[in-house]
Image (cartoon, helix red, strand yellow):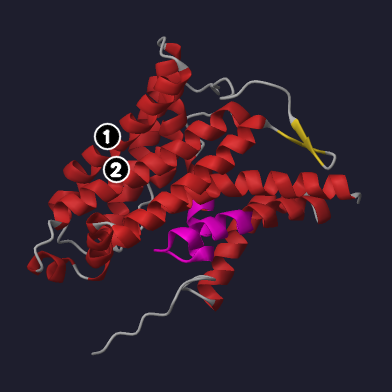
Amino acid sequence: METAELLQYVLAGLKSGSIYALVALGFTVVYSSTGIINFAQGEFFMLGGMLSVFFHGAGMPLPLAGLAGVLATAGVAIAFERVALRPRRDAGPLVLVIITIGASMVIKALARHAFGPDELGLPEFTPGPSLSIAGAAVERQSLWLWGLTLVAVLSLTWLYRKTKLGRAMRACSISHDASRLMGIDTASVVMVSFGIAAALGALGGLAVTPLTQTAWDVGGTAGLKGFAAAILGGLGNPVASVVGGLALGLLESLSVAFISSTYKDAISLGVLLLVLFVRPQGLMGLVRREKV
């Protein structure tokens, strides 16, 4: 295999990995404040693209349509948290996870009826021919995708380390009862966490739509691979989620190059199972020890 061809596969893997990373960041944000896995995260990825297409088709300029799509998706997530999860906040984690699975199914069905079964697309953020890097072609939209992923992880890292909201989110992940005793409004923290997570997923859906188009059923695959990326890197750590996403994207792309495209989608499930069996805390995760 020539160097240019191998580089093409690497760039394709980094492109896919950035998508997985943005979805994984959403899983991390919710887990960091609630300790549960939000399996509706993939549908927020789908809504980001679909709603942006809807607003753009309604006459909005592309930047405003994208912003409206991301904000509307965040609004859907906040409404979901308030209506479906908050009344059951004292239930066990399993109950809450099942509620998120049910929400995923409902959102997917409503999206099919609202937007139709066909694939939809958006124009590239920066139109123009692909760029050439050492003989490999790179779409201009991929640069946007990588840039947005970098901005997202840096923003989340700053949020967790430098702001009261970030510290409150981390405290809530350890104990909601203790956080309330310390004066933290845990209900508001969880609500904001769902809005941020949905916005991150929607951002990924928006950025990838000009490349691959979008449809009502893309959330399932995105959610599975984003979850695998989050587990691979380590839940609760934004940097680890991005590393996990990029690593998963590279594994998939290189498996196509050296094995077969037949096994591309099986890589995510295989990685997820392997990490859960061998290192449940993820590649960059730390083992928590609790005194009893």
Residue at x-position 69% and y-position 21%: 128
Within-10-Å neighbours for mark 1: few <14, some 14–19, many 20+: some
Position of 202 with respect to 74 (left or right) is right
Give how far across and how far down residue 17 sits, in percent. Answer: 60, 49
- The stretch drawn in magenta includes residue 234: yes
Among the 4 quarters of the image, the one containing residue 208: top right
**CB atoms at circles 1 and 2 under 8 Å apart?**
yes
Residue at x-position 79% and y-position 48%: 7
- The stretch drawn in magenta includes residue 72: no
Position of 172 with respect to 39 (left or right) is left
Query: What is the three-letter code of the residue carrying label 2?
Result: Gly
Give whichever of 1, 88 is nearer the camera.
1
Q: Circle 2 sits on which residue?
A: 195
Q: Which residues are magenta?
A: 225-248
Element marked by disc 2: helix
Q: Circle 1 sits on which residue?
A: 75
Vertical placement of 191 versus 93: above or below?
above
